[in-house]
Amino acid sequence: MEVRVLFGASRTPRPGGVSSFQGHEGGTGLRRPPRPCHACGVPEDFTWRDGDRTIRFGRTALDDAPKLLGEGYLLLASARAAAAAPALVDAAGRVCTIGPGRVDDLAGDLLDEVRAARPTAIVALGGGRVIDTGKALGAALGGDVPVAAVPTTLSAAEMTWVHRQARGAPAGTTGLRPRLVLNDPQLSASQEEPDLAASAANAFAHAVEGAMTAIASPVPTLAAHDAARRLAAGMRDGARVDRDALALGALLAGYAIDANWYGLHHVMSQTLVRETGAGHGAVNAALLPVTAAALRRRQPEAFALIDEAIGEQVEEVAQRLARRAQAIRLRDLGIDEDQLAHCAELAATRPEVALTPSPAGPREMHQLYLEAW
């Protein structure tokens, strides 16, 4: 059976949409026996059908790309990602290289070109910026063009519907999740340190904050705890980096924040990245030791559960990842102290702040920025 057609998954489901993934057990025609992770009993290679999306995870995931993606799609890719997955480039009908910039601008610059090209599908190959650009384009096209994601970092953008909208998108455009995710740890955890540690810190922050928002529910919270355990174990001092653990931990943490959202830490880090241009992963790494302490003061019981899951304190893991990411202080990332007050004022206006119990105001956020600086 050949599976070719994908359907974009928006946050607001559209009536009448049907998936081309067929079959009772697997839908994809893939019946490969899963390889168990003996430490936890969870397969290392699996297909996960989650509502209207399919997630293919494992070191053989890209082997299934021809069946799942077909050919002739519009490929968005960073230069590094394209070099790492040449078969996906060869199968594309059109390739757009995504460089630095803001997602709303990157997607906005491409929107007219993509509309004119009328692609049958969009495949985003890269880190969070590339995948969010693909999501923004798919959303701006009304969800009619299917979007697939192939991550090359631990950003977990492939798992969420959260993204900036493309400049020029129709009013009322909603967020979009990729309908298909191909996550091969050899790609998604392919960065080298310190970049890999910075990306792991971002993923660990997803797991921590995703377990304790005001709208948290049991299943995503359980996923967040398991994600935190894998991410903490995947990068321990004196041990080999476990890239498979990092990749699956990041994916599960993305699932958690897709359902439970996030609050104080991510609002502060996202605002700082957008306003200063500092690297996303590095900012997360530098901020998390400080914001984790602020979150623990608010929800000590929730933090105790994460500590128990990972076998050490959250702050210890955060400090280890920050050190390995070479992001001990915000000043090390080229951020000026006089930028912090403005960022705190902006961050305090974000509605997601309310998802952290006892929401922080601009004064506390400024103080936290200063502590991390």
Image (cartoon, rainbow, N blue to C red):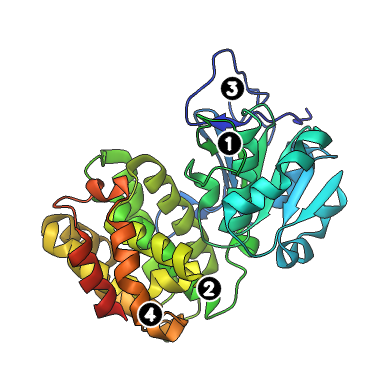
Counting from the top left corner in percent of width and height, residue 316 is at 27, 77
Asked if the residues shown at circle 2 and circle 4 are in contact, with their CB atoms under 8 angstroms apart, the answer is no
Q: Residues within 10 Å of mark 4 (few under 14, many from 20)?
A: many
Q: Residues within 10 Å of mark 1 (few under 14, many from 20)?
A: many
Instruction: Read off the residue under disc 1.
Output: 54
Q: What's the residue at 19%, 58% (across, down)?
A: 361
Q: Amino acid at mark 3?
A: His
* Front of the two marks 3 and 1: 1
176 above or below 202?
above
Q: Nearer the viewer, residue 304 or 24?
A: 304
> Residue at left 34%, top 45%?
261
Q: Nearer the viewer, mark 3 or mark 2?
A: 2
Type of amino acid under label 4:
Leu
Q: Secondary structure at mark 3?
A: loop
First-in-chain label (3 vs 2): 3
* Residue located at (76% from left, 34% from top): 115
Dot in front, 2 or 4:
4
Q: Are marks 4 and 3 in contact (CB under 8 Å)?
A: no
